[in-house]
Image (cartoon, helix red, strand yellow):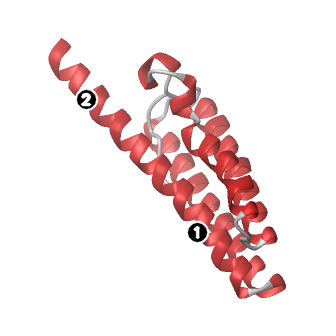
Amino acid sequence: MAVSTVSAPSEREHGSVALLYLDMVLVALAVPIALAAGAPTVGVTAGAAAWIVLRLAQIAMDKQLVNVYDLRRRLGLGVAFSMLRVWLLASVIIACGVAVSRADGLTAALVIFGAFSVNFLRNAVSHISRAQARSTSG
């Protein structure tokens, strides 16, 4: 989970809204495919729902952090929220594995890990392209 310590990225910085929400779009597209392939229903839906809800919360938090001008406070709040998000996602995985079945827990973990990987790569590409744009313009 990348910690955002700068202002929330604008649509222009990411190229498009679709790229900003790429992880959530791919999760939403993968759910019916996974269910049709016979993946455990609770694991797929719980993992997807947890990722999407907490990712939307992260986007809202990043927008709120723009209003925090003290860098230490902004960083602290960003890290605290990111850690909370990790714990909540882990709790969903554990709850699926314990309350339903290990297969559901594993499926929830795979959905969350896949979404995290896409989001991580999107963030990396975004940071690299912003750094290159700054170095060529400045």
Q: Quadrant of residue 35?
A: bottom right
Res. 110 mark? 1
The spot of residue 119 in percent (x, y) is: 49, 47
Q: Are marks 2 and 1 in contact (CB under 8 Å)?
A: no
| Residue 22 appears left or right of 31 | left
The spot of residue 49 in percent (x, y) is: 76, 55
Q: Which residue is mark 2?
A: 131
- Compared with 36, 103 (above or below) is below
- Compared with 36, 118 (above or below) is above
Tell me which residue sits at (71%, 86%) in the image.
102
* Amino acid type for the residue under numbered disc 1: Leu
Tell me which residue sits at (80%, 69%) in the image.
41
Number of residues whose C-alpha sits closer than 10 Å to that of mark 2, classed few (under 14), some (14–19) or many (20 or more): few
* Amino acid type for the residue under numbered disc 2: Ala
| Residue 11 appears left or right of 25 | left
| Residue 118 appears left or right of 90 | left
Count of numbered badges drawn on the protein: 2
Tell me which residue sits at (44%, 32%) in the image.
6
- Compared with 34, 93 (above or below) is below
Q: In the rendered image, is residue 28 in sight?
A: yes
| Residue 113 appears left or right of 132 | right
Q: In the rendered image, is residue 58 in sight?
A: no
Disc on the earlier residue, 2 or 1: 1
Nearest to the observer: residue 67 or residue 120: 120
Report how far apart the C-alphas of labels 2 and 1 lie in the structure. 31 Å
The spot of residue 59 in percent (x, y) is: 62, 37
Number of residues whose C-alpha sits closer than 10 Å to that of mark 1, classed few (under 14), some (14–19) or many (20 or more): some
Q: Assign a secondary structure to mark 2.
A: helix
